Image (cartoon, rainbow, N blue to C red):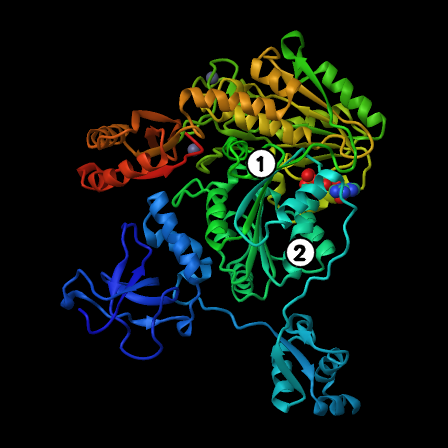
């Protein structure tokens, strides 16, 4: 095949390759970065052309033509982005089609989806001005719309709602030549000055600005409340006023209306926003605004990372240690690592911010590969909170709270201040148990206890979604002896209500917040500053600025101290400091009360006495001695199936064909949650001293795994740089 070019297309199928097609017979040509419709087997599929090639390994008679070029042949993914995606599928060992599909907004994964028309603005023509000067007569709605245009061009959105059929009215006005459409102008930033920077902030801003014109990764390591967000604002101000675009990535829970408001106020423009809570249409609109350069600023969660941005000049990733930056299924990429890669390819700076940086980033900063910008004080000059460790062995507790804790809560409320009670949700949800025989509700499909939701009278598995009604009698011994055990946020809320009847209680957890708007209402109430109690889970730990909270209670942390996951201590330290960072953020000093059965635990003491940096260097040393990340490089071969036997046999046969080399391999071992959704989960662990050694062996191994007979019977995948075991 040399007479015509071959187009190599990424298709959403789990095969580790691109697929060759001939150019379409007629019409606009297909080109790299554009969407096409092709036949694959007996199905039609949307794919993206990745590259062209002079020939194909396939015999000519087996090559098919591309059926249709979509989007009028537009290149929707630029060459740099295609290269980034290629790096991703090679690095994460994922099928190209899967990786490319996840870079597309969901609406464009089907052939019906199309790129939206660019937004228009409307203005009156001279004829329109004349018509407006005449009496409305019977055309009252029409006249009202002309009137709305009197003061200058407006968007279609601001005409919506004039009359019941505003689109039709607008069409009439356009037909009559009274109104004209033109492309909406690109918003220009209109920045307001922020507070005067304190010296650490000013130094951080200066360091990044000095190297705006090339790739450099900066770790902005600043205690909670040290003004990291203000540093981002100063950098964004500069980049946007240079006419470039900027991408800000935040953790799932971090993308609050408050944060967006802050961008709007400070930078004078509405950021385009991408997160999983938006409708497909909204996501597409934001994506397209960024892709066409109409949106100078894009703020989003993990998946926004792959948005094409033609003039991208800066990437900021806030709370870089946050676990939600790692995708935990399918294409298991780390948005942090890929963001650094994207910045390197574009030769632009990237800023990773955190009060509790990941060990990976601290190691890179320590070895000089990243710039290390430290903010050691709180910007508002508020002091860091004081710790109070409460030894639970010497206390009786009720609903998980010890007497001194209740006293401290009462005193804080009496001083008209706010209290936050933080519950680590994992392993601490309420379960229903039988006092007579010891039965408790557990999921039939997972290794998990069912969480008891008292108000709805249901037992739910928070891992697979299984639900059932609460039984009246014990299912095992039929005794009328079912009681709740363990505390959830709901019980804690009820108990606190009884103890402090005068203080309003606001609950922040997934059940409560899933109702639209509740989070905002509650946050507004907190911000009014009246005394109140906030009860919640991880959701409270991040990013929020609650000036009136002066006492934070951490109900229980002990689980992390003895976890089987070597990252548990890192996460525990981050969680404690993030939660504690909510205390005393303004003029009044804050206190953090930590309830624990293990006050003597060495790691905990180090964290509290010496702070995160010392704690992190100790953990780094431990990891170093064990050869664990970030000292070594890890990968998992994960597998699951209904029958545990199958999983085990598959992993053993994979182990048997593992190529010789420097990588050590262990297992099979059960996942920490071995049963999930009715399937058994196990894995092999690979550990190597060099990244290239690891990748070389995995690449040689994968074709051998695919040939194993069991490879079609179990579900399996490779997880590079895993975050969960
Ligand atoms: P972080 O992102 O590090 O948690 P923020 O940027 O949210 O910190 O700042 C914490 C608080 O301090 C905010 O209320 C912010 O307005 C304020 N702040 C930040 N920088 C300054 C400054 N230079 N002077 C006064 N207040 C500041
Ligand atoms: Zn029983
Ligand atoms: Zn379950």
* Residue 322 image point, x, y percent: 55, 37
Q: Residue furthest top?
A: 394
How many marks the image carries: the answer is 2
Which residue is disc 2 drawn over? 238
Residue 53 as seen in the image, left or right of residue 322: left
Relative height, residue 654 to residue 87 (above, below):
above
Mark 2 lies on a secondary structure that is helix
- Which image quarter holds the C terminus? top left
Tell me which residue sits at (43%, 57%) in the image.
81
Residue 720 as seen in the image, left or right of residue 715: right
- Which image quarter holds the N terminus? bottom left
Tell me which residue sits at (67%, 10%) in the image.
395
Determine crowd level at label 2: few under 14, some 14-19, many 20+ residues with C-alpha closer than 10 A. Answer: some
Closer-to-camera residue (323/42): 323
Which mark, residue 456? 1
Closer-to-camera residue (540/98): 98
Q: Does the rendering let one see residue 642?
A: yes
Tell me which residue sits at (39%, 63%) in the image.
110
Closer-to-camera residue (639/611): 611
Q: CA distance from mark 2 to mark 1?
A: 51 Å
* Residue 99 image point, x, y percent: 38, 51
Tell me which residue sits at (57%, 54%) in the image.
213
* Residue 475 image point, x, y percent: 44, 23
Which mark, residue 702? none
């Amino acid at each position: 095949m040399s007479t015509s070019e071959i187009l190599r297309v990424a298709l959403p199928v789990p095969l580790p390759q691109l697929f060759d097609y001939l150019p379409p017979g007629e019409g606009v040509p297909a080109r790299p970065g554009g969407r096409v419709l092709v036949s694959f087997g007996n199905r039609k599929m949307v794919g993206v052309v990745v590259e062209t090639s002079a020939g194909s390994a396939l015999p000519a008679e087996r090559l098919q033509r591309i059926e249709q070029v979509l989007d009028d042949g537009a290149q929707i993914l630029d060459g740099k982005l295609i290269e980034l995606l290629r790096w991703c599928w090679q690095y994460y060992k994922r099928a190209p089609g899967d990786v490319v599909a996840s870079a597309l907004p969901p609406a464009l994964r089907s052939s019906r989806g199309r790129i939206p028309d660019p937004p228009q603005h409307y203005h009156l023509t001279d004829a329109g001005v004349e018509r407006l000067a005449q009496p409305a007569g019977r055309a009252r709605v029409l006249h009202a719309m002309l009137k709305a245009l009197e003061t200058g061009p407006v968007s279609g959105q601001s005409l919506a709602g004039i009359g019941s059929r505003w689109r039709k009215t607008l069409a009439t006005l356009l037909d009559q030549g009274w109104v004209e459409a033109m492309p909406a102008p690109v918003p220009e930033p209109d920045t307001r000055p922020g507070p005067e920077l304190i010296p650490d902030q000013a130094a951080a801003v200066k360091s990044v600005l000095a190297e705006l014109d090339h790739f450099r990764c900066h770790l902005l390591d600043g205690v909670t409340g040290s003004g990291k967000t203000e540093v981002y604002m100063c950098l964004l101000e500069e980049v946007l006023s240079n006419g470039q675009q900027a991408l800000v990535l935040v953790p799932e829970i971090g993308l609050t209306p408050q944060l967006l408001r802050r961008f709007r106020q400070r930078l004078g423009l509405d950021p385009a926003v991408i997160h999983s809570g938006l409708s497909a249409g909204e996501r597409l609109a934001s994506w397209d605004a960024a892709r066409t350069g109409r949106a100078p600023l894009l703020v989003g969660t993990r998946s926004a990372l792959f948005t094409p941005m033609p003039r991208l000049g800066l990437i900021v990733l806030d709370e870089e240690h946050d676990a939600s930056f790692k995708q935990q299924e399918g294409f298991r990429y780390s948005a942090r690592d890929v963001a650094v890669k994207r910045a390197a390819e574009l030769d632009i700076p990237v800023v990773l911010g955190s009060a509790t940086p990941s060990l990976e980033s601290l190691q890179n900063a320590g070895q000089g590969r990243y710039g290390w910008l430290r903010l050691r004080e709180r910007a508002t000059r508020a002091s860091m909170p004081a710790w109070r460790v409460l030894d639970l062995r010497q206390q009786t507790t009720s609903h998980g709270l010890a007497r001194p804790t209740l006293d401290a809560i009462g005193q804080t409320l009496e001083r008209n201040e706010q209290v936050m009670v933080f519950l680590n949700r994992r392993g601490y949800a309420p379960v229903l148990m039988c006092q007579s025989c010891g039965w408790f509700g557990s999921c039939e499909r997972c290794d998990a206890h069912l969480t008891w939701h008292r108000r709805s009278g249901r037992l739910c598995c928070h891992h697979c979604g299984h639900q059932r009604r609460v039984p009246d009698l014990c299912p095992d011994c039929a005794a009328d002896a079912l009681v709740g055990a363990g505390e959830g946020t709901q019980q804690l809320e009820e108990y606190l209500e009884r103890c402090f009847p005068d203080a309003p209680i606001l609950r922040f957890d997934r059940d409560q917040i899933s109702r639209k708007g509740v989070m905002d209402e509650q946050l507004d109430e907190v911000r009014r500053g009246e005394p109140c109690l906030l009860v919640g889970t991880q959701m409270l730990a991040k990013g929020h600025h609650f000036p009136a909270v002066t006492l934070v209670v951490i109900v229980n942390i002990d689980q992390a101290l003895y976890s089987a996951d070597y990252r548990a201590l890192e996460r525990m330290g981050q969680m404690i400091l993030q939660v504690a960072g909510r205390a005393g953020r303004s003029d009044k000093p804050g206190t953090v009360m930590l309830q624990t059965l293990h006050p003597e635990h060495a790691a905990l003491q180090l964290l509290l006495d010496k702070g995160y940096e010392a704690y992190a260097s100790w953990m780094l040393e431990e990891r170093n001695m064990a050869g664990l990340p970030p000292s070594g490089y890890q990968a998992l071969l994960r597998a699951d199936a209904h029958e545990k036997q199958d999983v085990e046999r598959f992993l053993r046969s994979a182990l048997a064909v593992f190529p010789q080399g420097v990588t050590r391999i262990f297992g099979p071992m059960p996942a920490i949650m071995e049963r999930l959704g009715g399937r058994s989960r196990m894995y092999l662990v690979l550990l190597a001293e060099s990244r290239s050694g690891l990748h070389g062996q995995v690449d040689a191994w994968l074709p051998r795994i695919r040939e194993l007979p069991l490879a079609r019977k179990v579900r399996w995948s490779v997880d590079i740089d895993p975050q969960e075991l």
